[in-house]
Amino acid sequence: MDIHRTKSDMRATRAGLARDGATIGLVPTMGFLHGGHMALVERARAECDRVVVSIFVNPTQFGPGEDYEAYPRDTDRDLAMLRDAGVDAVFLPDAAEIYPEDAETVVEPARLSRILIGRLRPGHFAGVATIVTKLFNIVGPDAAFFGEKDYQQLRVIRRVARDLDMPVRVEGVEIVREADGLAMSSRNVRLSEDHRRAAPVLHAALEVGRAAIEAGEGVTAAGERVRRRLEEARDAQVQSVDLRDAATLQPLRGTPDRAVVMLLAVRFGDVLLIDNMVAIPKEAA
């Protein structure tokens, strides 16, 4: 497994990996890998001839007072996991390699980046869209793989790739959950024992919402059920409960006749957790 810390070395290796028409799959990560990341690697290996994983804790997607410095890191462990998984190359740059001191260009889809999580975390998706654009330009993948846990992020990246005519197939991979339903996330390790026991309430609340939508309830009533279930958990600080059109993320009213995505953001102490689930109402089933 090749490990590269510079853009020039990564580009040189990319040329070799693509020899004889081999396809390249990219899995962008911020490290501290878990089963969800490895599901992305497995999907990339199944669909592409060669797999590249990037590890980069991107400072531009963290706002003031957020957890950039506290974000968990364990590069040696990450590299061992990727080596065992048969990854062909790892791109492991530092911030100075990615962002020149005088860099001023930002990529940002105007609407999608400023709603939902983008409203809670201003500038977050501009940072995401910019780093993903840079990784696509550096690695030159045929396909890139992202987890569906970050539902809005996946739609942001797909919109950027479409709008800027990027020749990259953006693939979503199903959420991987712990046995108790908690969506796998690198941030989970920062939960206290009490908060870790309480955190599966996100999945439980989503199940309540899905049942309500599938039974024909309107989005307002279903959303209230979800919020009440979340508020039963000790120390759960509900940041947002949103029910949106699953395809466009546009707001919905009344009883939906198409797929609904339920998007949650809940804070436990200083750890913000997100989760989502798609529900299909009877009218659309």
Image: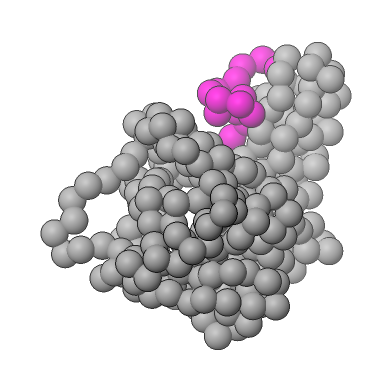
Left or right, 111 with respect to 220, comes to left
Which residue occupies the foreground of this view, 13 or 265? 13
Reply above or below: 48 against 189.
above
Which residue occupies the foreground of this view, 272 or 33? 33
Is residue 180 visible in the rendered image? The answer is yes
Q: Residue 66 location in percent, x, y?
A: 39, 63
Quarter of the picture containing the C terminus is: top right
Which residue occupies the foreground of this view, 133 or 202? 133
- Residue at 80%, 30% in the rendered image: 212
Kindly give the residue lying farthest to the left in the view shown.
102
Q: Residue 5 location in percent, x, y?
A: 38, 75
Which portion, as a residue range, is magenta?
Answer: 240-256
Reply above or below: 81 against 269.
below
Q: Residue 243: within the magenta? A: yes
Residue 200 image-quadrant placement: bottom right
Q: Residue 92 location in percent, x, y?
A: 44, 73
Is residue 68 visible in the rendered image? The answer is no
Residue 183 image-quadrant placement: bottom right
Secondary structure mostly taken by the magenta-highlighted segment of the chain: loop
- Residue at 45%, 67% in the rendered image: 13
Quarter of the picture containing the N terminus is: bottom right
- Residue at 72%, 30% in the rendered image: 222
Give the total of numbered labels.
Answer: 0
